[in-house]
């Protein structure tokens, strides 16, 4: 598929992966599908039992990639073959991990970052600023 024929779907992340142009989107259905195939939560991919960070196995990363892919007619065997080409192009599994991590962050999977004002709704425990002319 050439870039000229790709129509970008809303709320998707474009990813060139071993000759495939994928459009990735993480939504509720894809989360359920991925977790069913993995037999664990997506968060469980990144954390050990004691809360330590871990890097998931490559086959699990490819399951997440396939589960979030919105491009039609891309089979699991296409993803596996593309992974071989991706590595041959000089990429590593850490590059794939970083892309999936970005997708999860952009999708709000880890929660939305709030500014301090949003988090406190504008309320502060700090004392009110004192005017310079104040007697007290």
Image (spheres, rainbow, N blue to C red):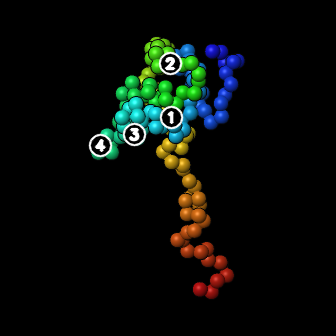
Tell me whether the residue at label 1 lies in contact with that at label 2, contact meaning CB atoms closer than 8 angstroms: no
Quadrant in the rendering for residue 57: top left
- Mark 1 to mark 2 CA distance (whole Å): 15 Å
- Mark 3 to mark 2 CA distance (whole Å): 23 Å
4 left or right of 37? Answer: right
The local secondary structure at tag 1 comes to: helix
The local secondary structure at tag 2 comes to: loop
29 left or right of 59? Answer: right
Q: In which quadrant is the C terminus drawn? A: bottom right
Q: Is residue 106 above or below residue 133?
A: above
Q: Is residue 111 above or below residue 13?
A: below
Q: Which residue is mark 1?
A: 30
Q: Which residue is mark 3?
A: 41
- Circle 4 packing at 10 Å, graded few (<14), some (14-19), many (20+), is few
**First of labels 1, 2 by sequence position:** 1
The local secondary structure at tag 4 comes to: loop
**First of labels 3, 2 by sequence position:** 3
Q: Is residue 126 above or below residue 53?
A: below
**First of labels 1, 3 by sequence position:** 1
Q: Which residue is mark 4?
A: 49
Q: Which residue is mark 2?
A: 75
Q: In which quadrant is the N terminus drawn? A: top right
- Circle 3 packing at 10 Å, graded few (<14), some (14-19), many (20+), is some
Residue 101 in sight in this render: no
């Amino acid at each position: 598929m050439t870039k000229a024929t790709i129509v970008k779907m809303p709320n998707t992340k474009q990813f060139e992966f071993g000759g495939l142009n994928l459009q990735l989107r993480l939504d509720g259905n894809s989360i359920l599908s991925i977790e069913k195939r993995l037999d664990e939560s997506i968060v469980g991919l990144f954390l050990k039992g004691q809360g330590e960070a871990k890097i998931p196995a490559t086959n699990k990363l490819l399951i997440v990639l396939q589960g979030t892919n919105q491009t039609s007619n891309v089979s699991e065997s296409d993803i596996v073959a593309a992974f071989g080409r991706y590595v041959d192009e000089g990429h590593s599994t850490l590059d794939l991990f970083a892309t999936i991590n970005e997708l999860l962050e952009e999708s709000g999977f880890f929660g939305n970052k709030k500014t301090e004002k949003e988090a406190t709704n504008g309320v502060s425990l700090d004392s009110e600023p004192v005017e310079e002319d104040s007697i007290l």
